[in-house]
Image: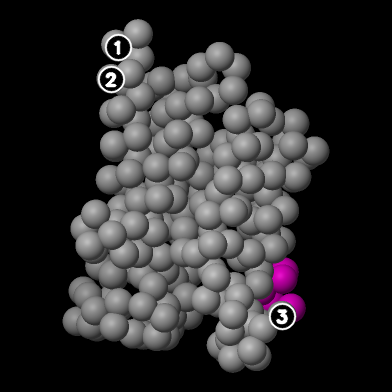
């Protein structure tokens, strides 16, 4: 039992630290010598990076954050495996990653909205489901011109897609549901701006 708890703690800690790596902050600091937390929304995510460095670095940071989300989950699957049939360790790794991205220990517990890293975790749990969610995000974002709308809808649909399309373990579905709630919460200011008609569109 003690051994399991030690492994559990290591999974959570390592995943959180990987999630905490502030990709957007590092890229903007290195290339533009600016603090992304003082620009636009103050988020370290790819959308805010685009305001400083343009479309190219938007996609690069998006992919880096998705990889950052997927890596701890893959490591948990490879080296720890599943527990009691619900995929406990990969799910805990996924939770720790998105919390780390949004509450980075390296940035005084500030960060991004965890969308790209969240999709990365889902890709690692079930790549088919992850691709569907990424496609939904892309289509809705392109159609509405609002990144926040695409992000919210894609993540809210994720538990249903994981269950009905992915036929995944209960733990994976529960993670998608909890992750969706958390990410919608992180977008609460975006939702307020959408209601007021003040949300910025993708140009």
Per the image, the residue denoted by label 2 is: 6
Q: Residue at x 35, y 34 (%)?
A: 12
Per the image, the residue denoted by label 3 is: 144
Q: Tell me, what colour scheme is on the image?
A: one colour
Cα distance between the residues tagged 3 and 1: 49 Å
- Looking at the picture, does residue 41 appear above or below residue 185? below
Q: Is residue 111 left or right of residue 74?
A: left
Give whichever of 42, 73 is nearer the camera: 42
Is residue 99 highlighted in magenta? Answer: no
Whichever of labels 2 and 3 marks the residue nearer the N terminus, that label is 2
Marks 2,1: beta carbons within 8 A: yes
Q: Circle 1 — which element?
A: helix
Residue 94 at x, y percent in the picture: 47, 40
- Looking at the picture, does residue 76 appear above or below residue 1? below
Cα distance between the residues tagged 2 and 3: 46 Å
Q: Residue at x 29, y 28 (%)?
A: 10
Main secondary structure along the magenta-highlighted residues: helix
Read off the magenta span: 138-143
Which of discs 2 and 3 lies nearer the camera? The answer is: 2
Quarter of the N terminus within the rendering: top left
Q: Which disc, if any, is residue 3?
A: 1
Is residue 139 highlighted in magenta? Answer: yes
Q: Which disc, if any, is residue 129?
A: none
Name the residue at the right extreme.
164
Residue 125 at x, y percent in the picture: 57, 36
Whichever of labels 3 and 1 marks the residue nearer the N terminus, that label is 1
Residue 58 at x, y percent in the picture: 45, 73
Q: Residues within 10 Å of mark 3 (few under 14, many from 20)?
A: few
Residue 37 appears in the picture as rendered: yes
Residue 56 appears in the picture as rendered: no
Occupied quadrant, residue 57: bottom left
């Amino acid at each position: 039992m003690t051994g399991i708890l030690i492994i559990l703690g290591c999974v959570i800690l390592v995943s959180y630290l990987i999630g905490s790596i502030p990709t957007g902050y590092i890229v903007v600091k290195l290339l533009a010598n600016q603090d992304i937390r003082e620009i636009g929304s103050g988020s370290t995510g790819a959308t805010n990076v685009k305001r400083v460095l343009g479309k190219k670095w938007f996609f690069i940071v998006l992919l880096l954050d998705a990889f950052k989300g997927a890596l701890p989950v893959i490591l948990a699957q490879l080296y720890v495996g599943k527990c009691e049939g619900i995929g406990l360790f990969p799910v805990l790794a996924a939770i720790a990653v998105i919390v780390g991205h949004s509450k980075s220990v390296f940035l005084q517990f500030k960060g991004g909205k965890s969308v790209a890293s969240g999709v990365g975790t889902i890709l690692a749990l079930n790549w088919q489901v992850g691709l569907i969610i990424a496609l939904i995000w892309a289509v809705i974002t392109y159609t509405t011109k609002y990144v926040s709308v695409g992000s919210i809808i894609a993540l809210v649909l994720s538990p249903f897609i994981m269950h009905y399309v992915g036929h995944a373990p209960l733990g994976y579905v529960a993670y998608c549901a909890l992750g969706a709630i958390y990410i919608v919460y992180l977008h609460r200011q975006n939702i307020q701006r959408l209601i007021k008609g003040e949300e910025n569109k993708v140009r």
